[in-house]
Amino acid sequence: MFKVEIPRRKSRQIMVGNVAVGGDAPISVQTMTNTETTDVDATVAQIERAARAGADIVRVSVPSMDAAEAFGLIRKRSPVPLITDIHFDYKIALRVAELGADCLRINPGNIGREDRVQAVVQSAKDHGIPIRIGVNAGSLEKDLQKKYGEPTPEALVESALRHIEILERLNFPDFKVSLKASEIFMTVEAYKLLASQIEQPLHLGITEAGGLRSGSVKSAIGLGMILASGIGDTIRVSLAADPVEEVKVGFDILKSLHLRNKGINIIACPSCSRQEFDVIKTVNALEQRLEDVMEHLDVAVLGCVVNGPGEAREADIGLAGGSPNLLYVEGKPSYKVTEAEIVDQIERQVRAKIAAMKESGGKIISIKAVD
């Protein structure tokens, strides 16, 4: 199968809990909770749903000391590492570090006095946790707004370098940086400018991208441009939607660029009057049935004999519509299926393949279709 390898920028590796970020580690996928952090049960439930969808890391907003105390309870129950999102109040940062935060998202230049900055950095050192610097076009410093007149890539980078300088002066190299804007080309250019100036990992995102459909499109274009240039160590797709959808779209972007294979990759035709079965209904059903599968497999669902056999032969499991519909396993035609059987039979073959992979220790193996 034709495949392009994207050479990645070499970056310093940091640890967010047990997840490596940067270096040769896989690009991690993040999301952020949108529950009230003080509602511990609701926040934990959302984190668990995101983790089941494949999220490697979850960020939690901690706007108050009450939220910090709630975070301590949340952290004990979380199945994945948690980043705490904090603005301005250094005391909150100190408290969540004590309570088990895996990373502090706090901009050093916004904390205030030098002694407060030093206290936060020292706490991060003592607890062995990294810091994330997050620059956003919507909250640039007033003097930079005046200097540049409006948000620009150069303004974003200058803001980031100010925060970076503080951490470097305090001998703290374990940080990552994000440079986010809702304007795609500004974001892309900002990341390219900064990537050549620091060694630390970069967290990618198109901020305030929009709703599920439009935000997914903007994020795919923007993140795709950055990732295709080899830049990026961890990503978040920022959608006005369920955080689980952010995780799904994030993995779809990485899978499309061959940067990360996690979960089922469904190859499906858009359908037309040649289709021998309801392709759209079938694909929707398969996505729901197989959303728990984290192992990578290519599954092709094609409605007719024009492209069906060719695509089905290239996939791990494939279905080519025709008279009759024909199921392919590992590139070979296996058996005929009626429209009513398609979803059940594809799921059956996928799960048999996954089971065989697990028995072999995760190795890619060839198997015959299950009877």
Image (tube, rainbow, N blue to C red):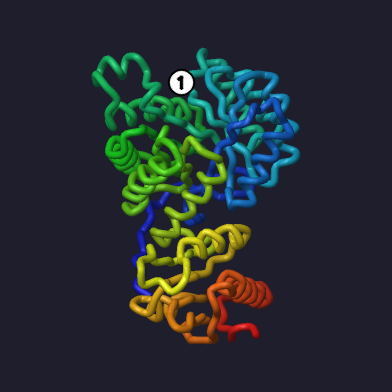
Describe residue 344's horizontal placement relative to residue 98 as left or right. Answer: left
Residue 287 picture quarter: bottom right
Give SS at disc 1.
helix
Q: Quadrant of the N terminus?
A: bottom left
The total number of labels drawn is: 1
Describe residue 217's horizontal placement relative to residue 95 as left or right. Answer: left
| Residue name at image x 46 percent, y 20 percent | 109
Above or below, 332 against 304 in this view is: below
- Work out whether residue 120 or residue 349 is closer to the camera in this orientation and state it: 349
Q: Is residue 113 at least partly visible in the picture?
A: yes
- Work out whether residue 167 or residue 261 is closer to the camera in this orientation and state it: 261
Q: Residues within 10 Å of mark 1 (few under 14, many from 20)?
A: many
In the rendering, at what x and y percent does residue 192 appear? Answer: 30, 42
In the rendering, at what x and y percent does residue 100 appear? Answer: 69, 35
Above or below, 280 against 313 in this view is: above
Name, please, the residue furthest toward the front: 273
Q: Is residue 202 at least partly visible in the picture?
A: no
In the rendering, at what x and y percent does residue 318 appear? Answer: 48, 76
| Residue name at image x 49 percent, y 70 percent | 299
In the rendering, at what x and y percent does residue 370 appear? Answer: 63, 83
| Residue name at image x 28 percent, y 32 percent | 153
Say which residue label 1 marks. 109
| Amino acid residing under circle 1 | Gly
Q: Quadrant of the C terminus?
A: bottom right
| Residue name at image x 56 percent, y 21 percent | 118
Residue 126 picture quarter: top right
- Work out whether residue 211 or residue 238 is closer to the camera in this orientation and state it: 211
